[in-house]
Amino acid sequence: MAPKALRARVEGVDLARGLASLLMIQGHAYHGWVAPTARGEAYALTRTLGTLPLPAFLALAGAAVTWRLDAGRRRGQDARELRAALARRGLQLLAYGYLVSFVYALMDGSRGGATLLRSDVLHVIGLSIASSALCVGATVAAFPFALRCLGLGVAVAAACPWVSDLDIPPYLAPLAALFVDAPPYTRMPWVPLFAWFAIGAGAAAMMLALRNEGFAARRAGTSLLGLAALGSAGVLLLSLGAWATDALTHAFAGPLSRAHPAVWGNVVDLAGRGLLVLVAGATLSLVLPERVRRPLVRLGRGSLVAYVVHIPFCYGNLAAPLRHRASMTEATLALIPLALAAWASVYAWEALKARARSWRGAARSP
């Protein structure tokens, strides 16, 4: 019989997503609010921390899908059914991405195509989940799925400098922006960001392979040995990626972009950072008291809501009183209510969904 923890969501992974959400909120808040003249060493630290959430969210998405496959295998789920479910979920997130862009455009009085049709974080996560359906084999199994994802991720990262320099006709740019650099629509393209999703899939496969019946596996999703192995892999990738980025930057001339070979080192570097957020969240799930752990898990499970709510207060018209004019102290004081509001929105959204389910249930009753 499968370990008890595998019958439900992995708490350590959800807590890691909550940690990534807090890092995301602080990164956007300081970036959007702090005046250029106040950007010293403390601000530089917030920018370094701000590099963690994007690769972490993609890695956590890859890990979640891999755990979903393992659960499907234990239930005897059909591979075609699972492929269809992944494709639907991914395309749903993609649609949410366009809907959120539309709402932000209305709030800020902008209806330009570059805003409405941009490819952003929800788009690339959704596209990564949908495309991962192609990595599900004839039978449902987590390890072969992870290997296929990793192979595709390596191919995508390797091709990045060439496909990022394509001359794309303007009428195709909004669609192409989902996959490659296509200014002015691209923010976060599938190439090379799918590589971080693939790293998460590989990490989850390792977690599954090294799990046991102990306390750590029930809470964090794998054994202490598994956490140590993943942490070591994260440090190795970060170190190797940082070295490669520097070496490739000096070896090849030209401005740094996704079309520069240094992107290969950057992808590896950030993949390591994403893994370290996963390991940190899983490890914290073992040591934090329940009164701290539970709210972080709840935030992680509602990270999409927290993302949607906080962005307008960092960059939109709602951020006007602070935008690029606050000191670090002022930004920090404003960050606290913003984080609490984003957190509260998660609880409010869950309560609203529960009320809606109750109403539907009552409506179906005779």
Image (cartoon, rainbow, N blue to C red):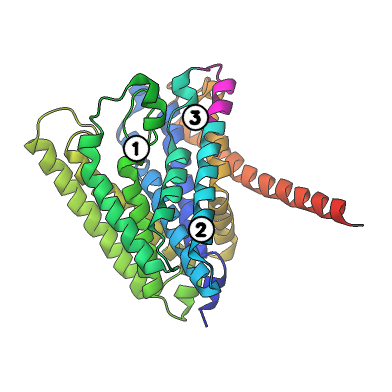
Q: Earlier in the sequence, mark 2 or mark 1?
A: 2
Q: Looking at the picture, which amino acid does disc 2 mark?
A: Asp
The image position of residue 160, as x and y in percent, is: 24, 40
Q: Which residues are magenta?
A: 100-111
Magenta-drawn stretch contains 110:
yes
Q: Compute the Cα span from label 3 to label 1.
A: 14 Å
Q: Which residue is mark 1?
A: 47
Q: Secondary structure at mark 2?
A: helix
In depth, the one of 362 and 37 nearer the eye is 362
* Labels 2 & 1 near each other (Cβ < 8 A): no
284 w.r.t. 187: above or below: below
Is residue 228 among the parts visible in the rendering?
yes
Q: Is residue 340 left or right of residue 243?
A: right
Q: Which label belongs to residue 314?
A: 3
Kind of residue indicated by mark 3: Cys
Which corner quadrant of the image does residue 51 belong to? top left
Horizontal and vertical percent for residue 318? 56, 24
Q: Which residue is mark 2?
A: 14
Circle 2 Cα neighbour tier, 10 Å, few/some/many (<14 / 14–19 / ≥20): many
